[in-house]
Amino acid sequence: MIIWINGAFGSGKTQTAHELHRRIPHSYVFDPEQAGFYIRKNVPKEAAKADFQDYPMWRESTYSMLAYLADEVDGTILVPMTVVNPQYFQEIIGRLRMDGVTVHHFALCASKETLLQRLRTRGEGKRSWPAQQIDRCIEGLAHDCFRDHLETDQMTIEEVVEKIAAMVNIPLQPDRRGKLRKLLDRYGTQLRHIRFFG
């Protein structure tokens, strides 16, 4: 099965995916953003697009990779990725579902104020690129195709993880880490996924 974790920047997608990975045996985190970075790096300026999701080959490669992994990987594939265009959603997730792949989709939703506060904790102010995308993301994710919506303003990452696991009926391994270990793991995930937007 594939669990796609959607949401605006600052919604907690990456942390949620990695916490699920820690607690679901035989799970794997797939990051479609890496293909976007590759495309962005290798397309000449005169053919460049502002958002790598606008490249048809990004959508095709994301679909193809996930279709391959769904066939070859015996486990749960976790995909933390913001997609707010219904057409792009259909080209990837809708197409996988038409192929018979089980894809559970969750949009982590929060107010603009909450998202800005979360971005500040990782050093990104209201003028940063992720902050500038919040309105677009909130508006896009309100579309019915992006259900299930999880309102996370008052939820911790642990609560989000437990909610998703319950909704897809996956048992979680007990989390026996202490508070310090959890904090270090959370910071480690954050540091490994710092993005520089330009």
Image (cartoon, helix red, strand yellow):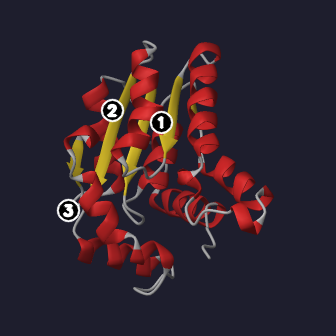
Secondary structure at badge 3 equals: loop
Label 3 vs label 2: CA separation?
Answer: 18 Å
> Looking at the image, is mark 2 or mark 1 nearer the viewer?
2
Q: Which sits in the foreground, 173 or 102?
A: 102
Image coordinates of residue 186 in percent, x first then y, are 52, 60
Identify the image quadrant of the C terminus: bottom right
Would residue 161 appear left or right of 91 to someone viewing this image?
Answer: left
Q: Which sits in the foreground, 162 or 100?
A: 100
> Which residue, given by chain and number where applicable, does mark 1 sit on?
23
Label 2 vs label 1: CA separation?
Answer: 10 Å
Mark positioned earlier in the residue sequence (2 or 1): 1
Do tag 2 and tag 1 residues touch (Cβ < 8 Å)?
yes
> Looking at the image, is mark 3 or mark 1 nearer the viewer?
3
> Which residue, given by chain and number where applicable, does mark 2 sit on?
165
Label 3 vs label 1: CA separation?
Answer: 22 Å
What amino acid is found at the position of numbered circle 3 in the picture? Gln
Q: Which residue is drawn at 61% across and 61% down?
A: 193
Q: How crowded is mark 2: few (under 14 residues within 10 Å), some or many (20 or more)?
A: some
Q: Which sits in the foreground, 54 or 24?
A: 54
Would residue 123 appear left or right of 5 to someone viewing this image?
Answer: right
What amino acid is found at the position of numbered circle 1 in the picture? Arg
Q: Is residue 124 above or below residue 13?
A: below
Residue 108 appearing in the image: yes
Q: How crowded is mark 3: few (under 14 residues within 10 Å), some or many (20 or more)?
A: few
Q: In this view, does 168 lie above or below 164?
A: above
> Which residue, given by chain and number where applicable, does mark 3 sit on?
154
Q: Residue at x 70, y 59 (%)?
A: 40
* Quarter holding residue 133: bottom left
Image coordinates of residue 45 in percent, x first then y, are 74, 68
Q: Which sits in the foreground, 46 or 180?
A: 46
